[in-house]
Structures are given as C-alpha cells and as structure tokens.
Amino acid sequence: MRAYLYIDQLVEVTPWSASAIRTMIARGTFRQGVHYFKPHGPGGRPIFSWQAIVKYIEGLEVAEEEIPFANGRVVKLDEIAKEAQRLLRRGT
C-alpha cells in the first residue's frame, strides 16, 4: 500500500465514495495536517496519509496534540511548548 493517496485512490481501498470523503473533509472529520495534506497550496488536490486513515478506521486516532510528519516522526505539541518555555526562561 502506498503511504499517500489521492481521493480516487482512497475510494478504491475504503468503503467510502469520493463525495463521502469530501463531506468528511468539509465536516472536519478528516483534518488537514493529520489525515490529509495539500503540498501544492490551498487549491491543490488533497493527499491522504494511509497510516492516518487506517488509525481513523481502527479507532486509533492520532491525538490532536500530536502532529505526524511524512518521515514518520510524531511531534507532541505539549513537549514543544514546554521546551519553548524552558528556552524563554533560560534566555531572560
């Protein structure tokens, strides 16, 4: 399975139609930066992370405070915030 899929490819491997997927985007079920990306800008075609879609289907949703990157690394926002506060305190 490919790591990233366009809507038409996602339709082939999930029970959803293209219109259902677009509705899930519009309703915020699929979140940009988590489930899909638009590397070519706001008008570009959404590209879905298969790993994030599988987690959604299996109920293993990525927590909102985590951001998965294309290289597989997951950044936790609370850890970044703590590190930023530590650096700010150190700089004063």
Image (cartoon, rainbow, N blue to C red):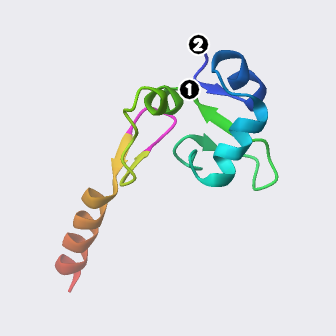
The majority secondary structure of the magenta stretch comes to loop
User: Which residue is farthest right?
Assistant: 43
The picture places residue 72, in percent across and down from the top left corner, at 43, 32
Residue 10 visible, this orientation:
yes
The answer to whether residue 38 of the structure is visible from this angle is no
Circle 1 SS class: helix
Measuring 56% from the left and 49% from the top, which residue is drawn there?
A: 31
In the picture, the disc for residue 1 is: 2
- Amino acid on which the number 1 mark rests in the picture: Trp
Identify whether 20 is placed above or below 16: below
Residue 71 at what x, y percent from top left?
47, 33
Answer left or right for 29 relative to 64. Answer: right
Disc 1 from disc 2: Cα separation? 8 Å
Check whether the beta carbons of the residues at disc 1 and disc 2 lie within 8 A of each other: yes
> At which x and y percent is residue 38?
69, 47
Q: Secondary structure at mark 2?
A: loop
Quadrant assignment, res 58: top left
From the top left corner, tell me how far across and down residue 78 is, in percent: 27, 60
> Which one is in front, 45 or 91?
45
Task: Please state, as top left, top right, bottom left or bottom right, where the C terminus lies in the image.
Answer: bottom left
Which region is colored magenta? 68-73
Label 1 neighbourhood size at 10 Å, few (<14), some (14-19), many (20+)?
some
Front residue of this view, candidates 80 and 10: 10
Using the image, determine if residue 76 lies above or below residue 71.
below
- Mark 1 or mark 2, which has the lower sequence index? 2
Outermost top residue: 1
Reply above or below: 34 against 49.
Answer: below
Q: Which residue is mark 1?
A: 50
